[in-house]
Image (cartoon, rainbow, N blue to C red):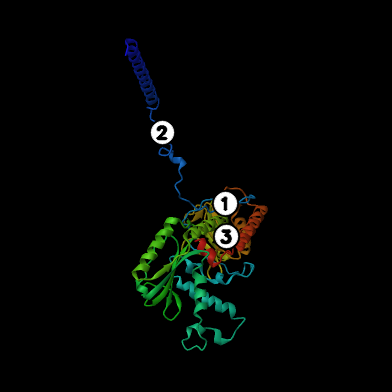
Amino acid sequence: MTDLQLYSLIGGGAIVVLVYAYNWWQERRYRKQVQKSFARNQPDVLLETPKNMVRSGETHRLEPIIHGQPKVEPKVESKTEPVIPVLRAVEPEVPVAPAHAAEPFNAIDDEDLDDFVDPEAALAARKVATQVHVEPVKPEPVRQEPQFSAAAPVAHEPEREADEVTSSLLDPALDFIAEIHAGELIPAANVPIFPGAKRIVTLGLRDDDQWEVVHHSGHSRYTELRVGLQLADRQGALTQEQLNAFCMGVQQFADEFDAVVTFPQRSGKIAAAQSLDQFCAGVDVLIGLNILPAEMPFPMEKVRVLAENAGLVRGPDGCFHYRSDSGKTLFTLANQDETPFGTTSDGLTLLFDVPRVAGGLAVFDYLADFAHSLSSALGGELADDNGKPLTEASLANIRKQLTTIYARMDDKGIAAGSMAALRLFA
């Protein structure tokens, strides 16, 4: 190898080393620039979302109130509703003009349907109401009380009895119903109070094929249980968490007795609960007609005399109730500020819970007449919640809106004042 070749190799190697060193230096310089550019802390848009952009998931039912304007104005009412602690289904009576024929369920007292009242009374009330309903058509004495006589020649019909119970107290359209089939008889004392945020009713099938409401202090034994959890009420729709807790409690109970439990499809029932709640929110209206004094407060002694002369009765809650012959409240008279009555009043309010009263148009007509007469006798002014005067046109507009609301409820198959309405608007 000549010197020329040797120097050429050395020079070529040196060039390669220089190129490699230059590339390494460039790469290192650009890397530093990139690290410097991205060295600043950047906010995480997922972790640092402003709180006001996140929904809490809590919902509150609005209970609108109808005013004289063409549109229903929403108004949030107190959940406790102190002025109307109990409203019941309406039976048309004098002086209220007869309304359209009510459903058989309407004859049942709504107090028998509340969570805090024994639901067995509702079944008994329905049986009595059914007998009264058919008595004029079939007056034979032998049909008066066939199911209460052990020696009655007419045989019991367990399937018909079961249908009557479930249609009265449990409804697949309103309840999530779990069915428990036991391998051995389950004593009533062993049936727990199942967890649930809504109304729960437990029915049991005795060994004699008769259905009854389960009393935990009873001595009956059951081959089958039906546990119903209501899908919606005035607190809102049943949630997935509430439904899961209910199903878990029922499943644990069934496992203790080696029983088989069947549940409806949960996702479908949750969707049904939300749809039902949306419908209820659209028709859940509380009408308030206010009577305001022109100058001096109203003397309560005069108010009492006028109210009693019109058929209203002072209730345990301190309010005046206009009731049917059976004692069911149709509307109430209370202080506008919801305080107890004293010697005087700075304003009166007549309250009418629309979806819970059957024959509501006739009741509203009497309510409007009474409001006018009471306002005139006291020298007051009839007004809405905004203090605007209520004219005949305003009241006529309210009545028109009531007609629309009742039509929507009828189309849904939930008539105002019916058992279903009393349950949903509790």
Upstream in sequence: badge 3 or badge 2: 2
> Could you tell me the amino acid type at mark 3?
Val
Query: For mark 3, does the 10 Å Cα neighbourhood hold few (<14), some (14 to 19), or many (20 or more) residues?
Result: many
- Which residue is the extreme one toward the right? 393
Mark 3 secondary-structure assignment: helix
Looking at the image, is 28 positioned above or below residue 345?
A: above
Looking at the image, is 70 positioned above or below residue 173?
A: above
> Could you tell me the amino acid type at mark 1?
Leu
Circle nearer the viewer, 1 or 3: 3
Instruction: Write down the residue under mark 3.
Output: 354
> Could you tell me the amino acid type at mark 2?
Pro
Instruction: Write down the residue under mark 1.
Output: 292
Q: Position of residue 39 (x, y in %)?
A: 37, 27
Looking at the image, is 255 positioned above or below residue 138?
A: above
Instruction: Write down the residue under mark 2.
Output: 43
Q: Position of residue 373 (x, y in %)?
A: 62, 59
Q: Tell me if I can see residue 217 in this picture.
A: no
**How many angstroms separate mark 1 from mark 3 (CA)?**
23 Å
Q: Is residue 318 left or right of residue 411?
A: left
What residue lies at 40% left-to-right and 31% top-to-bottom? Answer: 42
- In terms of depth relative to the viewer, which is nearer, 275 or 372? 275
Circle nearer the viewer, 2 or 1: 2
Q: Tell me if I can see residue 166 in this picture.
A: yes
**How many angstroms separate mark 2 from mark 1 (CA)?**
57 Å
Residues at badges 1 and 3 in contact (C-beta under 8 Å)? no
Looking at the image, is 421 positioned above or below residue 104?
A: above
- In terms of depth relative to the viewer, which is nearer, 337 or 66? 66
